[in-house]
Image (cartoon, rainbow, N blue to C red):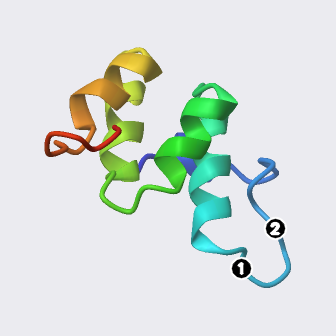
Amino acid sequence: MTIKHLAPGAPCSADGPPVDVTTWRLCRLQESGFARDLAARLASTAAVDIHALLQLVDRGCPPELAARILSPITTSGEAP
């Protein structure tokens, strides 16, 4: 994760107790430019490496493409 994602005063940073992991993941993804629906789906999927997604986006990869690149492989019959 880069400094860009740790900027003080960002909507995800709070002075109180930590938020749950899914909420934190959702917020970080949205701050990085992911659409809410895509961010929600990725945030709730434990197999998705959020840090790797953020690194790809930091390097200029569009969020949708980063999600495709790092999406877990599903077996036949499963929804992505």
Q: Is residue 33 above or below residue 74?
A: above
Q: Looking at the rendering, which quadrant does residue 17 occupy?
A: bottom right
Q: Quadrant of the C terminus?
A: top left
Q: Which mark is residue 14?
A: 2
Q: Which mark is residue 73?
A: none
Q: Are marks 1 and 2 in contact (CB under 8 Å)?
A: yes
Q: Residue at x 84, y 75 (%)?
A: 15
Q: Amino acid at mark 2?
A: Ala
Q: Is residue 76 above or below residue 51?
A: above
Q: Position of residue 13 (x, y in %)?
A: 75, 60
Q: Is residue 75 above or below residue 25?
A: above
- Residue closest to the eye, 1 or 50: 50
Q: Residue at x 27, y 38 (%)?
A: 71
**Left or right placement of residue 16 versus residue 61 in this view:** right
Q: Badge 1: how crowded within 10 Å, few (<14), some, or many (20+)?
A: few
Q: Position of residue 2 (x, y in %)?
A: 43, 46
Q: Marks 1 and 2, Cα distance to the nearest angstrom?
A: 8 Å
Q: Position of residue 33 (x, y in %)?
A: 60, 25
**Left or right placement of residue 63 versus residue 32 in this view:** left
Residue wearing tag 1: 18
